[in-house]
Image (spheres, grey):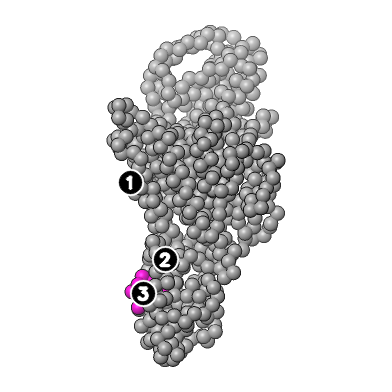
Amino acid sequence: MRILQLHSDFIEYKPIKKEIAIAEECEKKKNRLDEVVVLFTAVEKGDDEQVARMAIDEVKSSLKKIKANRILIYPYAHLSNNLARPVDALKVVKEMEGYVKKLGIETHRTPFGWTKIFNIKIKGHPLAEQLKLILPGKKVKTEARPRIKKFYLILTPDGKVHQPEKHRFKKGEEEFKVLVEKEALGVESRTKGEPKYIKHMKKFGFDWEAMSDLGHMKFGPEASLIFDLIAEYSSQLTKFLGIPVYPLKGSNIFRLDEKAIAEHANLFPERMYKFEMENRDFILRYAACFQQFAIIKDWQISYKHLPFGAFEVADSYRFEQSGELLLSFRLRKMAMPDFHTFCKDLEEAKEYFLKLHKIIYQEIKNLGRDYVSLYNLTSREFFEKNKKWFLELVKYEKKPVLLCFYPKGVEYYWVLNVEYHIIDDMNRPREIATIQIDVGNAKRFGIKYVDKDGKENYPIILHTAILGTIERWLYTLFDTALKMKNPALPLWLSPTQVRVIPLSDKYMKYSQKIAEQIEKNQIRVDIDDRIETVPKKIRGAELEWIPFSLVIGEKEIKSKKLAVRIRKSGKIKQMKLEDLIKLVKKETEGKPFKCLPLPKLLSKRPIFVG
C-alpha cells in the first residue's frame, strides 16, 4: 500500500463521474474539510486487512506528532502501477475506515470508484508531506476480528420455545439431538475413520479427479447416468409448484468489475474462485444466482407474471478448505439444481415457501429417511411477527426445529434460510436441501416488476435446492443404502435394473430374447455372458447391487416362468416376464429414464479401474 499523507489547511473535492461498475453511490456535490490530514491511498496487489490496520497504526503515530485528529481517506490509484482489483481495494479501504474510527479519530472518506476534482492547501511544516509504503507480511499487533455471535432456541410443534441446553429430548428426537448438540452446543461426533459410503460410490464410478484442483469429482459411465437422471428429476420437481418455470443456462465466469457481481462476491469472499485474465478480474460462479439474475434483470415483468420460477442445473464453485473436502459432500466444484421463485411480496413468498417445504420433505420420506431442520434467521422480530406461519412449517415436520438468530448490525440479503439435515452413518448432521427468503438481490441486480398501480417494485426471491446439490443427494442415497439389510439404490437410478444370467451358451439366444422384451419397456437390462461360473455371476450381481437377477436355463424355457432374485428382499420369486415388467414399471413410474450407457453384453465391456 502507498499513502501520500498531506497535513492540510483544507481540501475541497467534488465527485464528477463513476469510473468503474462497483463505484459507490454518492451525491455530485462539493465537499470541504478544514484542518485535516489527507491520505491519498493506493491499494496494491497482496494488500489485505492486516495491511490496512498497519497503515492506520502508522498514520496514528504521525497524528500524535503533528497534533491532528481528523483524517480523510482519499482512494487514489495514480500512486501505483501494481493496483489491487477494485473489489479487493474497496474492501481494504473500508477496513481502514472502520479501524481508524474505533481508535476515536474523526474519519472521512471520499467515494470509491469516481473521477473527482479537488483543491488542497498544504501546511508548510517539515512533517506536512509524507510518503508511506506499507508492505504485507510484517507482524503487527491487531485486534482479533469479532466472531458472529449466534443465539439459539428450540421451537416445538405446540408453539413453545426452549433453551437448547434445557430442552428435554423425547423418544424419537435422537437425530434432532445430534443437530442441536453440533450446532448450538458445540458437541462434535466422536466417530472417526473413512466413511463407509466412499468405497460403494467408487464402485459405481464416482471418485476424485487427481489431475484437477482438489475437490473436483469425476464420473464414469454408470455414475454419469445416475447424475443425469437426478438432474432431470430435480427439474421435474419444480413443476409441482404449479407456476411457470423458465429453464435458463449461461456462463460460469463473471467479471468482478460488475457492481452486482462484486457485491454478491463480497458476501462470501473467502470461498470464491478468483482469477485474472487479460488484465481483468473474474470469478467462477458461486451458484446459479449470477446467471439467472443477469438474464431476468432485462425482462419486463408485470405483477400478472408473478409468481414464476427459473431453473438451471448450474456448475457451482466454492473454494472449500482442503482439509474439509469429502467425496460427494464437500467439494470445490458441484452441480447445483438451483430453483429461484420470484414472488410479488413477502406473503406470497411465505405461501410458496410452505409448498416447497412440503416437497422437500416428501422427497426425503420417499427414501425412507427424515430431515432435522435448522432455521437461520436475521431478526427475532421477523420470527415473532410471523410465528403463526413458522408453526405451520414445524407442524408439517411433526418434531422440533432449531432456531438460530444472527446478530443485529450486519447487512444480510436474506431473512430466513432453512437447512434440512440428515444424520449420516457416522452420526453427523449433514445439510442437504435448503430454502432461503431473499429480500436483497432483486435490488442489487436491478430486477423489478410493475404492480397494478403502475409502480415499480422489487420481487422477493426464494432460493431453493429441493434435493440439495446433485452430489449431496448422491451422498444421501449411498448413506441411506448403508442402513438397508441389502444395500441398494432406488430402482429408477440403478444403472442395470435387470440382469439376465444364462446357465450356459446353450441358453444365450433365449436370454437375448428375454432381454429384448424387457428393453422395449424402457428398462435397463444386461446379460452376463462372461466365461464364469453361475455362482460367481450371481455373486457379481449382488456386489453391483443389481435389483433383479434372472438365471435362465431349461426349466425357465419350458415353464415360461422366471426365477427372479430380488435384491431388496433377498428372496427368489417365480414370475412371468410380463409380471416382472409391470413390477419394474410401477416402481419407476413418474421418474426419468435413460438408456444403459454400456454394452448389453458384459463380455464387451472394458474393465473400469478407479
* Vertical relation: 130 (above or below) 410: above
Q: In terms of secondary structure, where does tag 3 sit? A: helix
Depicted 29 relative to depicted 551: above or below: above
**Does the rendering let one see residue 233?**
yes
Residue to which mark 1 is pinned: 244
Q: Is 164 displayed left or right of 93 in the figure?
A: right
Screen quadrant of the N terminus: top right
Magenta residues span 517-525
Residue at the image position 51 percent from the left and 85 percent from the top: 534
Looking at the rendered structure, the kind of residue marked 3 is Glu
In the picture of the structure, the residue carrying the numbered disc 3 is: 519
| Residue holding disc 2 | 588
- The three-letter amino acid code for the residue at tag 2 is Thr
Q: Are marks 1 and 2 in contact (CB under 8 Å)?
A: no
Quarter of the image for residue 590 reads bottom left
Q: Residue at x 56, y 39 (%)?
A: 376
* Percent of width and height locating residue 164: 67, 41
Amino acid type shown at disc 1: Pro
The CA distance from mark 3 to mark 2 is: 14 Å
- Find the residue positioned furthest to the front: 158
